[in-house]
Image: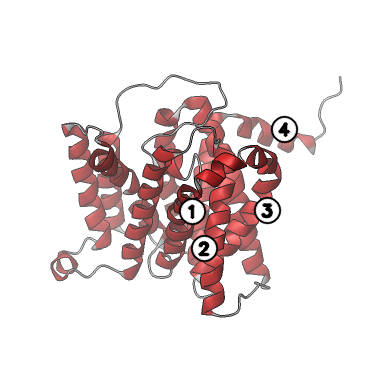
Amino acid sequence: MSSPTKAAVPAIRVSVLLGSAQAGLSVATLLWAGNFIVGRALRGSIDPLELNFWRWLIALAVLLPATVLSMARQWQTLRKHLGLVAALGLTGIAVPHTCIYTALQTTSPVNALLMLNLAPLLITMGSWAFFGNPVRARQWLGITVSLVGGVALIMRGSMAALLALEPTPGDLWMLLAAAGAATHALLLKRSPPGVTQAPLLCASVLAALAMMLPLLVWRGPLVVPTSASILWSLVYVGVLSSALAFWLWNRGVVRLGPGRAGPYLYLMPVYGAALSVLVLDETVQAFQCVGALFVVAGLTLTQPRIAEPRSHGRRCFRSNSPKTSGRGADNGCP
C-alpha cells in the first residue's frame, strides 16, 4: 500500500483530531469564542439584530438539508407545541444572541464571555425555584462566589463604580443574554416526547427568524450586506460557530456525557482573551482575571459530584449548562 501524499497528511491529521471527542469539544468552544471576536470586530459596521438574523439564516441553510426529513416525520408533534417552539426560538436564539452582539458594542469579548458564564448559576436557581430541584449548601456557596465574580466584572473592579452603581450598558445586555440562555435551558425541560434535538433546533431557528424579520422590516429596509469583510464574518458565525460548532459539541456530549463535557466551556474565556489580544489588540485587565477566578470557582462548586456514565448511543444529553442543556444540545450557542 502506498504511503499518503504530503498534501493528504494535513487532511488526515485534521480528520483524526476532529474524530476525538475531547478535541471536538475544544474546537467547538474555540469557534464560539471566535463569535465574540467577530461581534466585537463588526461593531459599528452592521446592526446587532441584522448580524444575528443573517447568522441564523445561514446556519439554517446549512442545517436544514440534513434535518428536513426528520422534521417532516415529527411535524405533527411539533405543530402541537408551536408555543414552546416559539419560546425556545425567542429565548435561545433571537434574544440572547442579539443581546450579545449589542453588548459587544461597548464591552470587551473577555468580559462578555465571563458574564455569560453566569447562565449555569441562573439555571440552577431557576431549577430550584420552578421545578423544586434541591440545591445543596455547597451549590449555594458556589452561586454566591460566582455572583461576587459577576459583580466584580460589571463594576470593573472599582469600588467607586459599585457605590455609584454605574455598570456599562454592555454588561447589562450580557446579563439579559445570560438570563435568556438560562430561561431557554429551563424551557427545554418541557421538550415534547417524540421530538429529537435536530428538528427542534431547526424549528426554533425558523421561529426566531420569523420573529426577527418583522422587527427588521419595521425598522427600515432590510439591507443585504455586500462588504467582503462582513460577508466572510457571516460565513464564519453562520457555518463555523453555529452549524459546525453545534455538531462537534453535540457529538462530544453524546460520547462523554454532559458532566465531562461541561467543563470545556471554561475554555471560552481563555480562548476569548487570547483572540482579543491577537486579533483586536485588546488587553486583559486585572479585574477580569479576578472575576474569572470567582466565576469559575463558583461554577466548579455548583457542579454535581455524581459521575455520569460514558454513553455510545445517539441520544442527546441535557445538563445544567447553557451549552449542553440549552444552546449546545439544542439551540444556538454564542
User: Which is more foreground, mark 2 or mark 4?
Assistant: 2
Instruction: Between residue 36 and residue 158, name the one nearer to us.
Output: 36
User: Which is more foreground, mark 3 or mark 2?
Assistant: 2
Q: CA–CA distance between discs 3 and 2?
A: 18 Å
Q: CA–CA distance between discs 2 and 4?
A: 42 Å
Q: How many marks?
A: 4
- 310 to the left or right of 305: right
The image shows residue 104 at horizontal and vertical percentages of 43, 65
Indicate the secondary structure of the residue bearing disc 1: helix
Residue under numbered circle 1:
86
User: Which is more foreground, mark 1 or mark 4?
Assistant: 1
User: Which is more foreground, mark 1 or mark 3?
Assistant: 1
Instruction: Residue at 50%, 21% (x, y): give it.
Output: 311
Residue under numbered circle 3:
61
Tell me where residue 262 sits by quadrant: top left
Q: Which mark is residue 12?
A: 4
N-terminal of the pair, mark 2 or mark 4, is 4
Amino acid at dot 1: Ala
N-terminal of the pair, mark 3 or mark 2, is 3
Instruction: Residue at 65%, 72% (x, y): give it.
Output: 225
Residue under numbered circle 2:
211
Instruction: Residue at 30%, 29% (x, y): give it.
Output: 304
Please say if 102 is above or below 81: below
Instruction: Residue at 61%, 42% (x, y): give it.
Output: 75
N-terminal of the pair, mark 1 or mark 4, is 4
- 141 to the left or right of 220: left
Please say if 137 is above or below 47: above
Q: CA–CA distance between discs 1 and 4?
A: 41 Å
The image shows residue 150 at horizontal and vertical percentages of 26, 53
